[in-house]
Amino acid sequence: MLLQIVALLEGLSIVSGQAFAAGFYEGVDDLGNQIVLESPAVRIVSLAPHLTEILFELGVGDNIIATVSYADFPVEAKQIPRVGDAFSVNVEQLVAMQPDIIFAWETGGANKSLKRLESLGFTIFRNEAPTLAGIADTIEQIAVLVGKAEAGLLLSHQYRARMAQLARVPVINGSTEVNSARVFFQISDQDLYTVNGQHLIGQAIKLCGGENLFEGVPISVPLANLESVLRGQPDIIFITRLPATPASPWEDRWGQLLGDRTQILPVDPNLISRPSTRMLDGVEFMCSAIRGGRQVIAH
């Protein structure tokens, strides 16, 4: 694997050298929009916490001149000025900052502001990785635009390798046969919002070998009803909860309704809902639970 990565890095260096000599740093965002810069972006705005995480991992965190609420990882990100949140941004403040590029999350609700910024001539990279594997592609494209192509390629290959490792079926006593755990993933501690099979979290459940109770629902984030969950007889219920915060009332309620046969497990939403490399930490936690605590063994 190491030799393969080195070879890929060398190949990228040749291609990148040709592109840079021509005076272009070229990438494609997740919506297929081609972005061309005459020099790598130095004044960077990140309008999503997970994009801020990726930029720090690429080594350009110090170049982020503005970000949004909840961009709290790594700890250095907390010192970056805020220009809004997932739903709205201060256009006037951003214009005054004159960024070289704006990295934005398409799913966020700031599209009206983004269109205005585009009309003013600002370069915007729109992120919307539809698959777990797509996170690696996003990393590579962002890396080129900030002048870190080689670091991006290495990071993306490390991500893909870890994802492949998590997807491997555990070997137990010489056998790969494991019972498929029935899973309900509860996003909110107020209502029974969950995920279908196309959602990134739904993809994680499938990668781990779990059976998502709402796999085939056409809506990405459907609102389940109590009866349908009970009827599905889940083996595991994951509930998003930040570490060191009080348990959700649902955690006790599920225990009363389903008894000891169902595991009720809180999972850090920052590790399973932010499409950065850290998402695989959340996936690993889920895989371990779904596989009965078994560790993945290469075979």
Image (tube, rainbow, N blue to C red):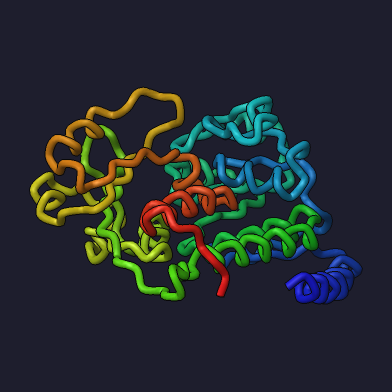
State the residue at coordinates (15%, 43%): 258
- Residue 215: % across, % down: 26, 63
Which residue is more in the foreground, 178 or 115? 178
State the residue at coordinates (88%, 70%): 17
State the residue at coordinates (25%, 45%): 193
Which residue is more in the foreground, 83 or 222? 222
Which residue is more in the foreground, 293 or 257? 293
**Residue 151 visible here:** yes
Residue 247 position (above or below residue 255): above
Q: Quadrant of residue 2?
A: bottom right
Left of 248 or right of it: where is 164?
right
- Residue 98: % across, % down: 72, 38
- Residue 294: % across, % down: 44, 58
Quadrant holding the C terminus:
bottom right
Left of 179 or right of it: where is 75?
right
State the residue at coordinates (45%, 30%): 243
**Residue 119 visible here:** no
Numbered marks: total? 0
Left of 116 or right of it: where is 53?
right
Which residue is more in the foreground, 141 or 119? 141
Residue 230 position (above or below residue 167): above
Q: Quadrant of residue 143?
A: bottom right
Q: Quadrant of residue 39?
A: bottom right
Quadrant holding the N terminus:
bottom right
- Residue 113: % across, % down: 51, 41
Q: Residue furthest right?
A: 21
